[in-house]
Image: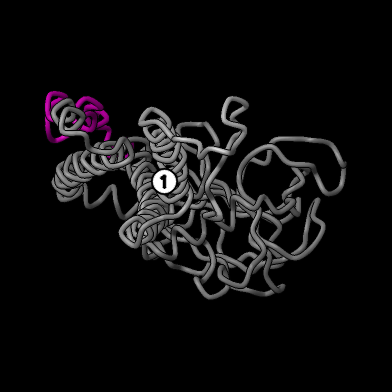
């Protein structure tokens, strides 16, 4: 009797007979076997394809991660360059062209991209990533603005050649030496808490902290219209009329080395830094006055500063150190 054979009792013959397995049973067993095995293999395939990355997928994920990091670096660089270009455009329109009494450069020439909008639509149709399309658009916008600014500065250069005398008179250098300015605590033009009154007031100039006796320079050719002391709070101070609607004021001096009515040249020493008047420490308070209106002096240091030094000065001034007067 075989181990796996099955038998049944036949009451007619009073004996055991072997159970015969029909073809349908074999077919049913085979069907269930294939179904079970297939389900197992489907499960294995699902796990492999959804949870276990292939070597190619691992490589692509690493490449995507590297591209994402590089894009973030590129985006930060674009943002920084856009900021610097905006500063140059602002100086162009609100300083250089104002100086030369010229209309601002047309804003329409600075707007837009090199390629038309249809070019970017075609990138979308070709399934380019949105971040690639955006970076391309920003790069082209920046390139167009740089080209426009180059043309604008060429025009400014032509205006400059025609107004050499005006350029000599305009305030265009820092009132203290560059090395002193690098070490000085700065307080920029704008709303500040006054160090003495503790009231939020408009600070209408720029402060340079320095040792008493540090030389102060005339920032442009002109004629001294005031040199002395009064009740204004500036202590001992000097006002220079540069003509063309420009004046400069130098406050809190310890010593004045010029007099009213005297002509001075740019770079000439007119006095020394001090702590006179309403002041909380030795420093120079410097103002630029254009057609009777006090403006931010930070745009009037373009002659002696490199672009890097000017950008550093802006960043330091933006820290908004409390004024000393």
Q: Residue at point 31% right, 42% down?
A: 96
Displayed quadrant of residue 213: bottom right
Rate crowding at label 1 as few (under 14), some (14 to 19) or many (20 or more) other CA atoms within 10 Å.
few
Q: What residue range appears in magenta?
A: 97-119
The residue closer to the viewer here, 111 or 279, is: 111
Magenta segment includes 105: yes
Q: Residue at point 68% right, 65% down?
A: 209
Overall secondary structure of the magenta section: loop
Q: Is residue 278 left or right of residue 163?
A: right
Displayed quadrant of residue 228: bottom right
Q: Quadrant of the N terminus?
A: bottom right
The residue closer to the viewer here, 159 or 198, is: 198
Q: Position of residue 100 (x, y in %)?
A: 26, 38
The relative height of residue 50 versus residue 294 in the rendered view (above or below) is below
Q: Residue at point 70% right, 74% down?
A: 211
Q: Residue at point 64% right, 53% down?
A: 319
Callout count:
1
Q: Position of residue 288 (x, y in %)?
A: 51, 45
Displayed quadrant of residue 103: top left
Q: Position of residue 233 (x, y in %)?
A: 77, 46
The relative height of residue 286 versus residue 309 in the rendered view (above or below) is above
Q: Which residue is mark 1?
A: 41
Q: Is residue 5 left or right of residue 244?
A: right
Q: Secondary structure at mark 1?
A: helix
Please indicate, yes or no, whether residue 279 appears anywhere in the rendered image: yes
């Amino acid at each position: 009797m075989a181990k796996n054979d099955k038998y049944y009792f036949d009451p007619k013959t009073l004996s055991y007979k072997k159970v015969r397995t029909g073809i349908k049973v074999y077919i049913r067993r085979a069907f269930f076997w294939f179904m079970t095995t297939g389900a197992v293999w489907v499960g294995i395939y699902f796990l492999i394809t959804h949870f276990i990355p292939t070597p190619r997928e691992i490589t692509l994920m690493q490449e995507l991660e590297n591209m994402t990091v590089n894009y973030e670096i590129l985006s930060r660089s674009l943002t920084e360059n856009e900021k610097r270009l905006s500063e140059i455009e602002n100086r162009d329109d609100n300083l250089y062209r104002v100086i030369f009494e010229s209309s601002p450069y047309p804003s329409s020439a600075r707007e837009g991209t090199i390629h038309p909008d249809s070019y970017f639509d075609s990138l979308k149709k070709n399934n380019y990533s949105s971040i690639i399309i955006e970076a391309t658009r920003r790069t082209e916008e920046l390139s167009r603005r740089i080209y426009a600014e180059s043309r604008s500065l060429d025009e400014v250069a032509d205006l400059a050649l025609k107004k050499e005398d005006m350029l000599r008179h305009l305030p265009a250098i820092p009132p203290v030496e560059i090395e002193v300015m690098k070490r000085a605590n700065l307080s920029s033009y704008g709303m500040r808490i006054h160090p003495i009154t503790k009231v939020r007031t408009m600070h209408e100039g720029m402060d340079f902290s320095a040792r008493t006796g540090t030389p102060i320079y005339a920032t442009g050719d002109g004629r001294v219209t005031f040199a002395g002391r009064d009740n204004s709070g500036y202590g001992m101070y000097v006002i220079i009329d540069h003509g063309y609607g420009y004046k400069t004021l130098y406050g809190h001096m310890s010593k004045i080395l010029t007099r009213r009515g005297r002509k001075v040249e740019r770079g000439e020493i007119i006095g020394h830094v001090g702590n006179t008047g309403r002041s909380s420490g030795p420093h120079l308070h410097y103002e630029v006055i254009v057609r009777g209106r006090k403006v931010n002096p930070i745009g009037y240091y373009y002659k002696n500063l490199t672009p890097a030094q000017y950008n550093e000065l802006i960043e330091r001034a933006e820290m908004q150190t409390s004024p000393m007067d």
